[in-house]
Image: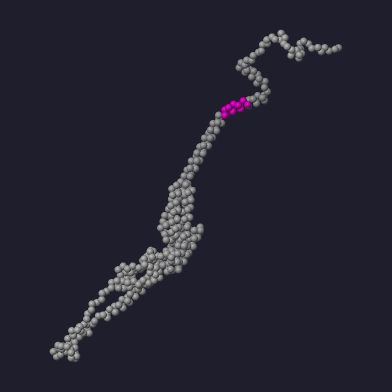
Amino acid sequence: MTENTTPTTDAPTEAAAWAEPTAASTEQVEVPTFAPPAPATLTGKASAFWNQLPKPTKVIAAVAAAVIVISAVAIPVTVTAVDEHNKQVVAEQLAAEQAAELKAAAELTAAQKDATSYNDTFAKFGATYKGYIDPKQAAAFETARDALVKAAAGDDIKAIAKAKKAVTAAYLAAAKSAGPVADQVTKKQTLADKASKDAVAKAVKVLNAAISGDGDVAKALAAVKTADDAVNKSQATAVAAAAAAAAAKAAAEAQAAADAAAQADEGGYSDDSEYSDGGSGDSGSGAPSSGGAPSSGGAPSSDGGAPSNPAPPVLDENVYVQANGDYRPGCDGFPSFLMYSHNPGAGGTSIINVDYAYDYSIDGQTVNVYGCDIPE
């Protein structure tokens, strides 16, 4: 039996599908339009769709919906938190800046007060140690102090610290110069005793150690000054003793000269006792006559045989000076100090014989002797 493979008319072939449309196929076909379903319809369909979902899917969907809701609420909350955080950061920064400013102001005030107090400790330094330290170092120290005063009046704390450091350096330099000055003092004061000079050398050694960091500089410097004063006092004592000895010698010599002059003056006077009331007459007997009257030749002759009475000499009211030794009129322009005075009396002579520079003046009958302060 042979199978019938002829297609039926109910199943058009592919060729028929691409064939030209016939009159019957050109009829108008109504295309349905889409209209959105009513809400109730959607709700019903959604409910039906939801009910058809498996349980795990429902759980996932519920969680996702919750996350969406929470995120929507958290967004403004997060913005608010960030704003509060920024405000807090700004406030903390302002507080830190204010604290830093207050700290800087307090540090500046403290530095200014410290600089002023430090500078005031040296207010009398120049006057106290004048003549005991090098003049150039003393001037440099005062210049540094003036600079510290100006720095303390400003608001630069670093400048204040720098100026204070400069004052300290200048102070140490001035203190160190006291050593060489003291050495010059001991060399100049040749009459001072050895013990006082040794004390100066010891004090200078202690001062140098203190400047190097091993001791109190102010205390050591004061000790050098005290030792210098002791040398000067020893010198003055020796000078006074030498002056007293010279004055005593001059007085003795003046007295001897006065005595010699007095003895010489006594030879210029006549003695009235050598003339007799009854002179001898021409007879040469010398005896009075019986009448008691002298003879005609007994009277004094008319050629000046009568005794002479010369006037006493005029006294010399002046005083004289014999300037021996190192006499320096006007002390060569350098300062001087009174060593001693001597009154040789009217017409007397004051003999000065010392081995150091001196000058003198005469006030009435008093001779004033001055030592010359001439640097070597």
Residue 240 in view of the camera: no
Residue sitting nearer the eye, 234 or 177: 177
| Color style of the picture | one colour
Q: Nearer the viewer, residue 14 or 63?
A: 14
**Residue lying farthest top?**
23
Q: Residue furthest front?
A: 303
Q: Position of residue 129 (x, y in %)?
A: 42, 59
Measured along the vertical axis of the image, is residue 130 above or below residue 239? Answer: above
Residue at left 20%, top 85%?
276
Check residue 70 for magenta coloring: yes
Residue 101: x percent and y percent?
A: 48, 42
Q: Quadrant of the C terminus?
A: bottom left
Between 65 and 359, the one nearer to me in the picture: 359
Would residue 35 be seen by someone viewing this image from the given angle?
A: yes
Residue found at the far left of this picture? 291
Task: Residue 231: name its quadrant.
Answer: bottom left
Tell me which segment is drawn in magenta. 64-75
Could you tell me which residue is drawn at 25 percent across and 76 percent down? 313
Q: Position of residue 95 (x, y in %)?
A: 50, 39
Residue in view at x 21 percent, y 82 percent: 307
Image quadrant in which you'd find residue 7: top right
Residue 207 painted magenta: no
Give the overall secondary structure of the magenta segment.
Answer: helix
The mark total stands at 0
Vertical arrangement, residue 371 with respect to residue 28, above or below: below
Q: Quadrant of the N terminus?
A: top right
Left-right relation of 368 to 301: right
Instruction: Give the x, y percent position of residue 191.
Output: 42, 69
